[in-house]
């Protein structure tokens, strides 16, 4: 197993987070955990 390497973050600009990006990220994370292999359609 590869060791984790921690270092300074080279870019400290703020990241813009919107509800849509959070939902897409959470959906992408949850799909494999639920055993689904297709993406969920986003209805906004």
Image (tube, rainbow, N blue to C red):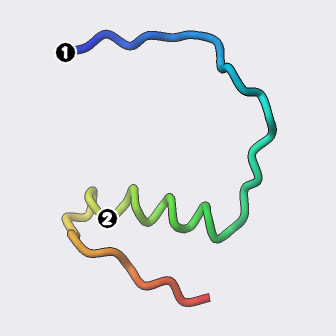
Q: In terms of secondary structure, where does tag 2 sit?
A: helix
Q: Considering the numbered disc 1 on the image, is that residue within a helix, a strand or a loop?
A: loop
Residue at left offset 42%, top offset 85%: 41
Residue at the image position 21 percent from the left and 69 percent from the top: 37
Residue shown at the point (39%, 56%) measured from the top left: 29
Q: Position of residue 1 (x, y in %)?
A: 19, 15
- x and y, in percent, of residue 26 in the image: 49, 60
Query: Relative to 5, is 1 on the left or the right?
Result: left
> In the picture, residue 2 is in which quadrant?
top left
**Which residue appears farthest toward the right when viewing the image?**
14
Residue assigned mark 2 = 31
What is the CA distance from the residue labelled 1 to the residue labelled 2? Answer: 25 Å
In the rendered structure, find residue 16 and report the number of the disc placed on it. Answer: none
Disc 2 residue crowd, few under 14, some 14–19, many 20+, Cα 10 Å: some
Q: Position of residue 27 (x, y in %)?
A: 44, 66
**Is 33 or 41 nearer to us in this picture?**
41
Which is nearer the N-term, disc 1 or disc 2? 1
């Amino acid at each position: 197993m590869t060791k984790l390497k921690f270092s300074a973050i080279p870019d400290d600009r703020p990241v813009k987070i919107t509800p849509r990006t959070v939902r897409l990220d959470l959906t992408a994370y949850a799909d494999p955990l639920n055993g689904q292999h297709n993406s969920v359609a986003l209805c906004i």
